[in-house]
Amino acid sequence: MKINHFFAILAVIAGITAAFTSHSVKNNIYPTWKFEKERVEGKTVRHISAHHLANLLYHKQEVSLLDARDWSDYENYHIPTALHCNMNPILEKEKSSGVVVLYGSAEDKNIYKMVRELPGRVYVLKGGLEAWDSLVLFPDPLQDKIRNTDQLKYIIRRSSFFGGEAQNTQLLNLNVRESRYREGC
Amino acid sequence: MKTRQAYPYWNPYIVGVGIGILIILSFVVTGRGLGAIGAFNGLMASVVHAISPDYALSKAAFSNYLSGIEHPLRDWVVIEIAGVCIGGLISGLVSGRFKFEVIRGPGISKVTRLIFAFSGGLLMAFAAKFTRGCTSGLALSGGSVMSPGAWLFMISVFIGGYSVAYLMRRLWN
Amino acid sequence: MELAAPLKYSMQIPEVYLLLFALLTGIAFGIFLEKAGFGNARKLVEQFYFTDMRMFKVLFSAIVTAMVGIYWLSYLGFLDSTQIYINGTFIWPQIIGGLVFGVGFVMCGLCPGTSCVAVFTGKLDALAVFAGLFTGLILYAEVEPQLAGVISYSSIGDISLYELFNMEYGVLTFVIVLVALAAFWFAGRVEERIAKRTA
């Protein structure tokens, strides 16, 4: 029975250290995180990832989007269904159902001040509009770790839904499927 | 000829850890785990194609294995099953467990056992096409990469087995 | 750091060496299966009569070992976990297929992999299982056009369990390790209980 106990102890040690070392944002898997709390300038801020925002909009969930940039930038391009923060109707709605997201450009620090002034729970788009461009509108599957063709097709579909286009699709060589069609093993 | 006393079986946990290390190696080198029923599919497709090519190409289940430039037998899972056969033969000879016999319960005849074996194989092949894998390909390799289907399959196999074990007790005990 | 595994892609190994590796892996797999006693159908089926829980022990210890190994290799950056093959999930076909597979398993006592080991250690009933497997495949090929929609029903893609449960990869690994160890202890107790009853 000695070797059984040895295996069991080894498995428990490996398992405990596995539980403490895993972090899905730092693991090299496709980003699936949705919301994250971070401390910025001493106050906690809630972030939403660009992928999750795009998924919510793609599946027509209730999202209230606020653009925190200048009016000219807003007119140039804004995320579909977003309202500029100068427009009052959103700010007056006391209880809006669904997710409320505030976004600006990536280096904008004023956003965090603005978030505190808004009522209710407001999320900030992590990475700003630059993240929206690089992850949703013009995704580069060679950079992101796409696992399979289903995910890839969804990314391409989603980017054209928002009016963008996926990059580098002709260079892709997804290795997870065998060259001959066979399902299973 | 003196028949050698058969060696005792190994500790199941040691065998399990050994198979687990094999699966890790297989993923590291080829990116896939093990497999078993795929070899039967490829073998069947090539045999049917040799007998009657038109029939083989008209059925989707066979033509999937015949499409492509490579021969259906030139496939990792077919070579692996060939290795399993060789390994079983080596181990059986070395351990003194090679013997021509029909494994059955004491109260049942050989013919009944063979009939049940045949129909059991039929059911298993049918089910394996639905689940896209058998225990070594789906449960072992899929379970170790945490595929939900693999875990569902494993749980269902145990439920299905335990539920008919009482009915089949005469076959084994 | 450049991820090194799967070596097939990072080292561009020619196909011949991959087939050679498959052969060696198969030989080792066959030796392990035979040494565990799975060349004998009774040893496998005794699992379902609680006398000898070998099949469960071998299966789960292999899964746990491989799972922990793959987690650690991918955490250390050696294995690229996005390039390995994850079996697709088809919920209802796999549940129903699993039940039917379990019934067939108790009827014949061998799974497709162990039936090869059994045939090559001389067991004649395994030849009947072979014949049954081949006939089943031909039967499926005949029936398949009618089943075209059913077989791909309720597919949820190539996801992993931790994505489904929204857990961390390592935490789920630990949970499964604990569940497996508890199950092994329990299986040992059941074996002792049954042995005492029949002794």
Image: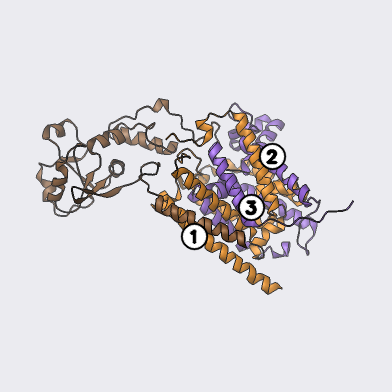
> Distance of mark 2 from mark 3, alpha carbons?
20 Å
**C181, C115: nearer the viewer:** C181
Q: Report the amino acid beneath label 2.
A: Ala
User: Residue B17, relative to residue A131: is it above or below?
Assistant: below
**Which of label 2 and label 3 is nearer to you?**
3
Bin the neighbour count of mark 2 within 10 Å (Cα to Cα): few under 14, some 14-19, many 20 and up: many
Identify the residue under disc 2: B82
**SS type, badge 3:** helix
Identify the residue under disc 1: C178
Q: Report the amino acid beneath label 3.
A: Val
**SS type, badge 1:** helix
> Distance of mark 1 from mark 2, alpha carbons?
36 Å
User: Chain A's colour?
Assistant: brown
Residue A102 location, quadrant: top left
**SS type, badge 2:** helix
Give percent across and percent down for residue A124.
22, 45
